[in-house]
Amino acid sequence: MLMDLHIHEKTCSSDSFLDLRKIVRLAQEKGLQAIGITDHDSMGLYPIAQKVSLEMNFPILVGVEVLTYEGDLLLYGVDHIPDQKMHAQELINWTKERGGISIAAHPYRKNGRALGDTMFELKGLDGIEALNGNTPMALNEQAWEAALKLGLPMFGSSDAHYEDRVGVFATKFDRTITHMSDLLQEIRKGNTTPVYYRNDSYHSYDTERIHELAVS
C-alpha cells in the first residue's frame, strides 16, 4: 500500500495552505491509501483528523514534526510532545520510552532544520526521509546514501504545504496501514520503499537513478 507520511495542514501549521478534506481528495486521486499529518510542533489536528477519517473512510494518522537543537524529527506513535526543546538524541529516547518511532526529516536540506551528519552519531533512529518533496534531488541523494550506510529504513514523502505537492513522493508498505499500530509495526520491520509519482502512477527509484537525477 501507498502512504504519504509528511503533510502539513493549515489548522496547526501556519505555513500550510492545505485543508484536510482537500488533502484526502488529492491523495485518493493519486492512488494513495493513507496519509500522515505531521504539523510543526503540534498534534492539535488529532480530533479533527479522527472525524474526517471516519467521514471519508480514509486512514489519517497524526504524527508531528518536532524541531530539535540539531534538526527536525518526524514522530509517530506518541500522543503529545515535550514541553521544551530537546537535543535530537534526547527526543529519540523520549519517543522510544513512549512506544513511538522517530524519522529524520529532510536531513540535508539547507534550511537550518536538518540533522545532516549528526544522524551518524544518533542511537535509536528508526528511519530516514530519503525522498522529500521540498528538497533538491542532490540533497535527497545524500539522505539516500546516509540511509544505506546506516542500514535504516527509507521513506518518501511530500512535505506538502500546497495542493500540487501532495503525494509527489510516498512510501510503499508491504501490508495495509489502517491504524497507528500497523504503521509502527511495518517501520520496525523495515518494510518501506520510497516511491515517486509520475504519469498517473507510483514508481521506485534505485541508487543509480537517484544519482542521475541529482547531477542532472
Image (cartoon, rainbow, N blue to C red):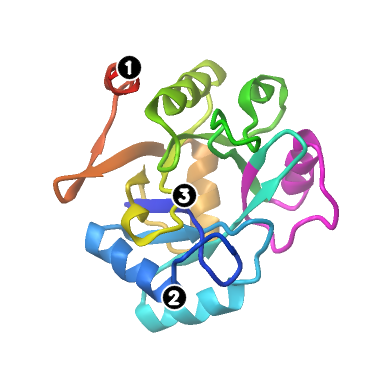
What residue do we see at 40% from left, 52% from top?
4
Task: Tell me the element at label 1.
Answer: helix
Left or right placement of residue 212 versus residue 94 in this view: left
Label 3 sits on residue: 159
Q: Amino acid at mark 3?
A: Asp
Task: Tell me the element at label 2.
Answer: helix
What residue do we see at 53% from left, 48% from top?
185
Label 1 sits on residue: 215
Q: Which mark is residue 92?
A: none
- In the image, the segment drawn in magenta is 73-99
Vertical side of 112 occupied by 99: above or below: below
Q: Amino acid at mark 2?
A: Ser
Q: Which one is in front in this view, the residue at disc 1 or the one at disc 3?
A: 1
Q: What is the x, y in percent for residue 136? A: 41, 31
Q: What is the x, y in percent for residue 96? A: 73, 44
Q: What is the x, y in percent for residue 178? A: 43, 63
